[in-house]
Amino acid sequence: MHNGASAEKVEAVLGGYRKSPLFSPRERLALELAERMTYTGKRVTDGFFEQLKRHFTDEELVELAAIIALENFRSKFNPVFGIEANGFCPLPAVQAASSAATERFR
């Protein structure tokens, strides 16, 4: 990973970021926000939003939500047209998860 998270962090997200010592409390909150915005049945409650506000500025929260929403959009839009990652993330755990998700759309 040239300009992003380490390979260990990316794999830790897949294996359970909540208990991984690789993530700061702020990073854990950002990842939980992504989960709450992504999974049906999960919500950003008032209490959770208050936690976010203790760690992020308003501007950072807008940026985080926008990036998460964009990635959620891409994850729904791209498979319709067969757009794949083209080997962007070479980690085996990520490739396996991506392949499994892609197969559901075929």
Image (cartoon, helix red, strand yellow):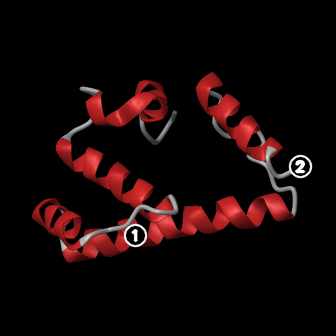
Question: Closer to the camera, 15 or 87?
Answer: 15
Of labels 1 and 2, the one closer to you: 2
Query: Residue 102, image x and y in percent?
Result: 78, 45
Query: Residue 39, image x and y in percent?
Result: 50, 58
Label number found at residue 33:
none
Determine which quarter of the picture holds residue 4: top left
Question: Closer to the camera, 47 or 66?
Answer: 47
Mark 1–mark 2 contact, CB under 8 Å? no
Query: Residue 37, image x and y in percent?
Result: 44, 64
Image position of 27 (left or right of 39): left
Q: In this view, which residue lies farthest toward the left?
A: 54
Label number found at residue 106:
2
Residue on which disc 1 sits: 65
- Answer above or below: position of 90 versus 60: above
Q: Residue at x 74, y 46 (%)?
A: 85
Q: In this view, which residue lies farthest toward the front?
A: 41
Q: Residue at x 72, y 44 (%)?
A: 101
Callout 1, which amino acid? Ala
